[in-house]
Image (tube, grey):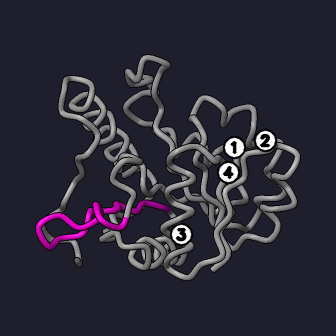
Amino acid sequence: MRIAIIGAGQVGSRLMQLFSTAGHDARAIGRADMLEAEISGGDVVVLAVPFAACADLLPRLAGALAGKIVVDVTNPVAPDWSPLRLGEENSGAEEIARLLPRSRVVKAFNTIFADVMTPEKLTRDGQRVTCFVAGNDQDARNAVAELADSAGFGALDVGTLPAARHLEAMAHLNIAVALSGGGTDAAFLYHNARH
């Protein structure tokens, strides 16, 4: 699978390494002038940029992203890592889907710290770290779940895109625990995940 990752920070770089090790053609793009060319060649495009950047960035890329699976890894957080309040009937993923109406947006990987995105940390006591997957397109969800499984995560399909409201709340909880001293070498393990 060809994967274009928008964002070459910690999350984008770690995901690129995991996907590449799993045999995928994965590239992290950090330069704006290369975005459209790299996106056009990707089967899957991963958004690994700050959520706050999406409102400006995505409308310019909507044409290039039309028809593609777009994986939203973002979390709506303020600069101090506190949650952005988007309303009970909304999520960052749903806002991104509205910015990209011709793309198949899937929420995934957002509950996993970059520190955990390494081969040696993806398995805890014999169980794979859970990658929750939500999206309105079942084929797109399946493709992202297969991608996550191939990279060493334990994918768990949680249904349509409104489930992202819960996933983003889980990420906010994860961040709050980390900031209170729990650290970022921590992950969710859902007991009934396939792995």
Q: Which part of the image, by quadrant, shows the C terminus?
A: bottom left
The residue lying toward the viewer, choosing from 109 and 151, is 151
Q: Which mark is residue 99?
A: 1
Vertical placement of 17 versus 95: above or below? Answer: below
Residue under label 2, please give it.
59
Residue under label 4, please give it.
6
Q: CA distance from mark 4 to mark 3?
A: 21 Å
| Residue type at numbered disc 2 | Pro
Q: Residue at x 55, y 82 (%)?
A: 23
- Whether the magenta-drawn stretch holds residue 194 is answered as no
Q: CA distance from mark 3 to mark 1?
A: 16 Å
Q: Is residue 5 left or right of residue 179?
A: right
SS at badge 1: helix
Q: Residue at x 53, y 65 (%)?
A: 17
Magenta-drawn segment: 119-135
| First along the sequence among labels 4 and 3 | 4
The residue lying toward the viewer, choosing from 49 and 157, is 49
CB atoms of marks 2 and 1 within 8 Å? yes
| Residue type at numbered disc 3 | Asp
| First along the sequence among labels 2 and 3 | 2
Q: Which mark is residue 137?
A: 3
Vertical placement of 126 versus 60: above or below? Answer: below
Q: CA distance from mark 2 to mark 4?
A: 14 Å
Count neighbours of disc 1 (C-alpha within 10 A) and say few if under 14, some if 14 to 19, many if 20 or more.
some
Q: Is residue 117 left or right of residue 9?
A: left
Q: Residue at x 63, y 66 (%)?
A: 69
Count neighbours of disc 4 (C-alpha within 10 A) and say few if under 14, some if 14 to 19, many if 20 or more.
many
Spot occupied by residue 149 in the image (x, y as percentages of width and height):
38, 76
